[in-house]
Image (cartoon, rainbow, N blue to C red):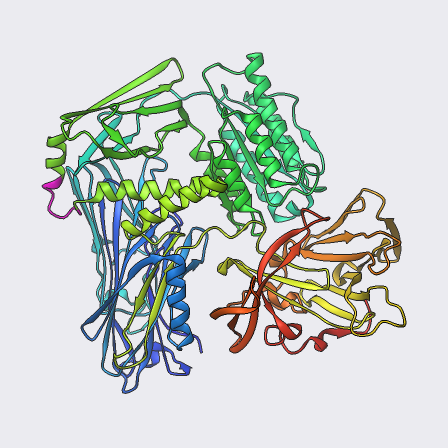
Amino acid sequence: MSLKFIKWLSVLQKNIQVVPYLKTSTKGQKRSASHEHPGGIEVYWLKIDCKVTSRFARNVITSRAVNRANVSKEAVFDVDLPKTAFISNFIMTIDGVSYPGVIKEKEVAQQQYQRAVSRGQTAGLVKASGRKTEKFSVSVNIAAASKVTFELTYEELFKRTFGKYELYLKINSKQLVNKFEIEADIFEPQGISSLDVEGTFLNNDLLPLVKKSFSGKKGHVSFSPTVDQQRSCDNCTTSLLQGDFVIKYDVNRDSPSNLQIVNGYFVHFFAPKNLPHLPKNIAFVIDVSGSMSGQKIKQTRAALATIVEDLKEEDHFNFILFDSSVSTWKDKLIKATPENVKEAKDFISKITDRGATNLNDGLITGIEMLNKARESGSVPARSASLIIMLTDGQANVGVTSVSAIQENVKNATQGQYPLYNLGFGYDVDYGFLERLARENNGLARRIYEDSDADLQLQGFYDEVANPLLTEVALQYPENAVSDLTQNSFKHYYDGSEIVVAGRITDNDLKNMIAEVNAEGAENEVTFTEQADVEETAKALEEQAYIFGDYIERLWAYLTIQQLLEKRSTATGYEKSNLTAEALDMSLKYKFVTPLTSMVVTKPEDVENANETAIADKPQEAPPSSPYYSIDADPHFIIAVPQKEDALCFNINEDPGIVLNLVRDPVTGVIVNGQLIGDKKSSNDAGPQNTYFGTLGIVNIHLDLRLEITTEEIILQNGIKQTRFKWLDDVILRQPGFTLIIKRKKSLEVSMDDGARFLVILHQVWKKHPLHRDFLGFYTLDSHRLSEQTHGLLGQFFHSIDFSILEVHPGTDPEKPDATMIVKNSQLSVTRGWQKDYRNDVRHGVNIPCWFIHNNGEGLIDGVHTDYIVPSIF
């Protein structure tokens, strides 16, 4: 039976959610909380308490519950946090005794976590869970008639977007709560200019319960409905509180800058207004490869059509489309006249998907077009040039090495143009797109393949649609400040804000002057802000409810974030230094970051179960994940992105055996593989190595069969049969189906339902005394298959969870052994690696993974012989 729970959600910017909820179960059996009251766990208080000082928020989420049953029960506290937030504290209080969290270096915390799990203790952690969220979860066993309080604190700096700061709460209360509270106190030294509250569930009865006020520097919002006011109908137990609750505000801007100083630290906010807009020059670089088929390309067309309508007549633009090759709408940037916009919309309506992914050449073409426009003077001298790239895949034609692409793009832009990368879908190499953008003064965003993807694309464009300044440099008194956060920016956009923080090293500094120099639409501009150090500090410290070290923590927050960003593109000695510095600051300021964890332990001498929780800030999933593959002997590799890890196993069977790899009864997709063995003489003894020599891919709904051997590819479409050799480069597009063959290297097959597979051809010397040619198989869009997908590989297209305990030396010093808990089984596993040949067919790339022995027994459903089928089709 599904768990009844109370869930409430607060978000610090649009689409960023914070959701705590409690769910309960008895030992060994989950129960519905709504059926347990008064004999179960009752949540009697839920509160979000948010204090905002100068855009920096400290949020405390509190949930209190009591176990009214006569047996012990488990309460689980789950919170969805913004990915940009840092947890700074967690306290669990049971029967009046508090157990606070401790921030530790990640590996140290992980060891403590593994020891706790090996003793049977429950645990919690932070993990990726949504568009811009990650989940914190902790469970605790509560004795009969006992109480528990969960209190989680996290901190985050608001980002100004479209002229507003947002506190976004998504309420999804599944149960009535005796005391439900949302409180937000806002203090802005510049003064609050507007404060609004919106709510999708705020009907005529609930609207008067929203209390909002602002005067001068202070603002306050509260919402606290009674139990009866929460009811969705008379005398029912379902809650009306389901939907969005959004607080939006902005500050007075009498001057373009604001300097604030407290306890030897300063923060400088820069957001000028009433400036003329710069004309912009945009190279739209659009992926139109076969994987963009269906909904993706439709949404891209819809977004681009809306975007071009928003272009101003002084703007210049062009479309660069890339698949296997590169094509352009026009041979140069053109002005956004009404006639050109009309023609552009007609061009957009005819964009179709085709071919492979030549990402490198698409980007270089866009950059060269911007360079020529500048050199020829065909665009205004005072204008903002930028590149917006949309892609859903990885480069598989032309330059395919990510490091080579990064180097090529960096050399081509020479720091002149910011690059904004929009990664479409789940299988995109987002880590690569993020590094590429950061190295070129831009940023990356994920575009999620939902019904609103076109709105996501347009929303991102709107953020950069109105540049006001370029080459923005913020300067401070020389020899008086240190440890500055980023203080130079390529562009400043209308409705946004630039934030710089640092330390004041001159104890005798009386007046602090900040100077901003930039290029405007008409001329060079300079802005100057002066602040009296003592008066500014005193004015801020007098506010009773402000956390006094907020500027120092804001500085630390920004510094750590920027160190982590630099670290993501650094290598060698530089990366080691950045890691050490970010780790040191994370520990000093008690932030859960990708380098640290927070551990909460309930001491062993306390009655009931011992509890350990680990709050673990995740990093972006590693490049090219999630993916699933089979290669070599045959090695199965299963990516588990939420663990930032992988599982692997081998299948040992005789040559000639056919194994079912993927079977989806909904989409009609089936993949089988037949084993071949090494060359072997009659005198050889013992088992021989096996590989896949033939693959069969079927789409029942399309009446399509594809037989792939090391010699040829046979396509059977209805009654028509077509044969291809590996010696040819082929791009074949048919309704619902695309086939791309790269000569002597690989084959990619894409289907309209989203299934997309890659086959690698491994060739050896024909006269080799032992080895034969063989095939590798990789999934590229497995998430598009249905929930009913199964097979040796297909069963892992759905999420899988595991825990690693008791890591200890194995027989090979470089490959430690461990105990794995997976699918309620305890397995002995070994740390090792397998080869991924997608980008390097000859040498491959080592993928670290936990190896499951005995043909994957305990990891796969059933045993491996259950997957043997009679023939390739």
617 in relation to 276, above or below: below
In the image shown, does 94 or 227 lie closer to the viewer? 94
What residue is rendered at 48% in x and 50% in y? 620
The magenta stretch spans residue 572 = no
Closest to the observer, 767 or 69: 767
Q: Is residue 737 above or below residue 482?
A: below
Residue drawn at x 53%, y 78% as measured from the top left = 825
Q: Quadrant of residue 558?
A: top left
**Left or right: residue 615 compared with residue 804:** left
Which quarter of the image is occupied by the C terminus?
bottom right
Quadrant location of the N terminus?
A: bottom left
Return the residue nearer the eye: 159 or 178: 159
Front-lying residue, 127 or 381: 127
Q: Position of residue 401 (x, y in %)?
A: 64, 40
Residue 128, picture quadrant: bottom left
Residue 190 in sight from this viewpoint? no
- 746 vs 313, left or right, is right
Residue 491: % across, % down: 41, 27
Residue 405: horizontal and vertical position, in percent?
Answer: 61, 36
Question: Whole-percent x and y of residue 54?
Answer: 23, 40
User: The magenta stretch spans which residues?
Assistant: 541-547
* In magenta segment, residue 546: yes
